[in-house]
Image: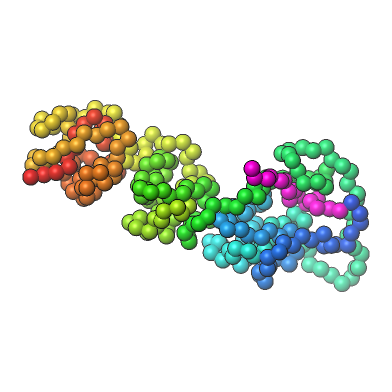
Amino acid sequence: MHSWFVLCLSAAALVHSSILPEHQHLRRQNGPVPSETVKDCTYFYDSQPGDTCASIANDWGITLSQFTTCNPSVKVDCSGLVIGDAYCVEENYGNGPAPPETTSSTTSKTSSTPTSPTPTGPTPVQSGITAECESRSMINVALFPTPTQSGIISSCTKYYKAISGDSCQVISDKFGTFIVAQFETWNPAVKSDCSQLYLDYYYCIAIPGTPTTRSTTSTRKTTSKTPTPTPKGPQPQQPGIVSNCNKYYLVKSGDSCYTIEQAQKVTAANFQKWNTGIKADCSNLYVGYYVCIGVS
């Protein structure tokens, strides 16, 4: 079972119970800190395999813009994120950029001794969280999924592990919440023909705004709507079958143009040419009707 803990990222986070000089309680992880990182960072996080800029920002309760501003080396598209490096997740104790330092005063900042707060929000929590804490984020100490291909969209929120028999279309059909074009945009390494989809690799299948339930209008989805059959060959038939068709297939529940093409060893181009009534997105493939899978 994975361990969970809560870290407070508000302005009062990590304040000691005694009076301390400014920045004495700065927390730095083990990894190297890129030179471009903001100088007033007060808490760092070591990036792990599977991390993205969006996932780190989400886990630490900050915006993606705040994360990239504090860590310019990752770049806006997150292509500069380096596994093992330490990245800033809290600037100036959560107060935003620190004001310019002056030499006119040597007075150090002090902090009041917090009282033991009554635990609120998610539990268990890290001991020593102050009563002023308003922002908490739950961190799963388990690593993000690996392996993944390069170029996965930085805002990915859900992953899927490719299994034997998968293709871009099959994965799209499994979930019904995105189309193949979206899958290929989120995972550009698979290429537009899906020739670089690798077994046992993780792929992005959702970003913010992706539906969580199967769409009733998803592409390549079969339907029970009754069309007008063509009066030739076995009945009923999908409308638009070519006149020289001599081999037919009865569409079953769960079929799609892609699964039929693969099972019957028919190219997508021929299937469309022999079944002219089927739309390019296969959204009007009818269950219980015959389609053409061969011609004379």
* Left or right: residue 22 compared with residue 153: right
Residue 48's x, y, as percent?
A: 61, 58
| Way the structure is coloured | rainbow
* Left or right: residue 244 compared with residue 119: left
In percent of the image, x 78 and y 67: which residue is there? Answer: 100
Residue 150's x, y, as percent?
A: 48, 61
Picture layout, residue 155 above or below residue 260: below
Quarter of the rendering occupied by the C terminus: top left
In magenta, the rendered stretch is 1-16
In percent of the image, x 17 and y 42: which residue is there? Answer: 293
In percent of the image, x 53 and y 48: which residue is there? Answer: 157
Residue 241's x, y, as percent?
A: 15, 39
Specify whether residue 99 is in view: yes
* Secondary structure mainly formed by the magenta segment: loop
Locate residue 78: give its quadrant.
bottom right
Specify whether residue 74 is in view: no
* Left or right: residue 89 compared with residue 215: right
In percent of the image, x 11 and y 44: which residue is there? Answer: 295
* Left or right: residue 32 compared with residue 116: left
Picture layout, residue 71 above or below residue 266: below
Residue 269's x, y, as percent?
A: 21, 50
Is-magenta flag for residue 291? no
Locate residue 54: give its quadrant.
bottom right
